[in-house]
Amino acid sequence: MPISSGNELVRLYKESGLGGQASLSVKAADADAVRYILAITGQRLRDLFVDKLQKIAIGSGVRVHFPHLYINLQARKVHPMPTDVQLQVEAKIRRLERWTSLEKAHVLMAPHKQTLCYILAYAITRAKERQRAAIWIPLGMDTGAQGHANALCLQSVDGSGTMKVLCYDPNYKEGQTHFVHSKKAVEDALPGVRKLLNGTGLGVASGCELFGNAIQTALGTTERHKGWFSSKVTITQRGYPICGSVVFLLASVWLTTGTGPVPGDIVEVEAALAAIVSSGEEGKALVQKRIAKILDDLIRNLGCDASDWNRRDWTQSVRARLDHDRKDWKESATSRGGSVTVGIPGRKEFTYSW
């Protein structure tokens, strides 16, 4: 897909909704219900993009687990899990069982470290149950004035029950000086993950490997400045605010690699993409066009699930998901009626009522 400028990439990124540019509002008689319905609906919107990755994985024959949970390390209100819910989600981790949507909502609303511990442990046990050798989990964090997309990739260590954790930051490059919060957050959570996995025969390797070659930055603008009285040339690179699309690009390419059901080494895949970008203007333009095509496809197909990608619009998909989720909601939330309204840029608002 041809693009005229980087600004067009930014426009496509915003219109795709991939950067989380959705608005949510809930009307319900029960205050507790407002919180968990917001959490559930927000997750279901993100699941629309996971569907596309699942479709790629199915088409490629690789067996990767997508736990349908988004790790949000950005500043947010937290709500401690009720004791009964906490005991139930821990028991399901040990039994390798699925969480309900209500249980997922409570985990998503918990304090950051607890959310991270439970999602990682749950993803590892569900991957075992589903016989998957790798896991993909989107992650968001703060970078000052705005959010920034990362992702966690877990891959099996020599086919054993242990997973290694890798964190991808599209702006990170080895040797940089700025601090990447997601790596520290994951490493702080790993002891808790091991505790939750105790007795399952599963484990997680020590440490979190942060990787990347600053593809987002390399895809942006490059300016060269030379002082009037100096021969020194200063090169400044600025990436476009399209971090989520670079993360999505890596996932979509990684899912097409590998031998049989096991995907390739994601670090090597990212390095190969970075080499194309850094090879010159032609390589840079090639990757920009690929991202534009991905975003255009997401815009046109937004809301269609993996089984019916070309027919269902996003409102039908969200409605179907919430119809299923509502079976888990408390009677106090549904008995007196209510609604949740979802807005995605460039699209008419959708209201789900009960």
Image (cartoon, rainbow, N blue to C red):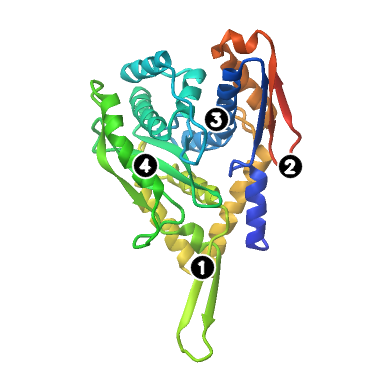
Q: Mark 4 against mark 1, which lies toward the viewer?
A: 4
Task: Point out the tag, 4 or 2, that comes first from the N-terminus.
Answer: 4
Marks 3 and 2 sit apart, C-alpha to C-alpha, by 20 Å
Q: Are marks 3 and 2 in contact (CB under 8 Å)?
A: no
Residue 228 seen anywhere in this rendered image of the structure: yes
Place of residue 71 in the rendered image (x, y in percent of width and height, measured from the top left):
46, 36
Which residue is the site of mark 3?
43
Question: Which residue does the numbered mark 1 point to in the structure image?
Answer: 237
Q: Residues within 10 Å of mark 1 (few under 14, many from 20)?
A: few
Kindly state the secondary structure of the residue where label 2 is placed: loop
Residue 1 appears in the rendering: no
C-alpha span from label 3 to label 4: 21 Å
Q: CA distance from mark 3 to mark 1?
A: 34 Å
Secondary element at image label 1: strand
- Sooner in the amino-acid sequence: mark 3 or mark 2: 3
Q: CA distance from mark 2 to mark 1?
A: 31 Å
Query: Looking at the rendered structure, which numbered label has been put on residue 346?
Result: 2
Residue at 44%, 21% in the rendered image: 81
Amino acid type, residue under disc 1 in the picture: Gln
Mark whose residue sits in front, 3 or 4:
4
Going from N to C along the chain, the mark reached first, 2 or 1, is: 1
Residue flagged by tag 2: what amino acid is it?
Gly
Mark sitting on residue 321 = none
Looking at the rendered image, the disc whose residue lies closer to the viewer, 4 or 2, is 4
Residue 188 position, x and y percent, is: 31, 39
From the image, tell me which residue sits under label 4: 185
- Where is residue 185, by image quadrant? top left
Residue at x-position 61% and y-position 50%: 293
Say which amino acid is labelled 3: Gln
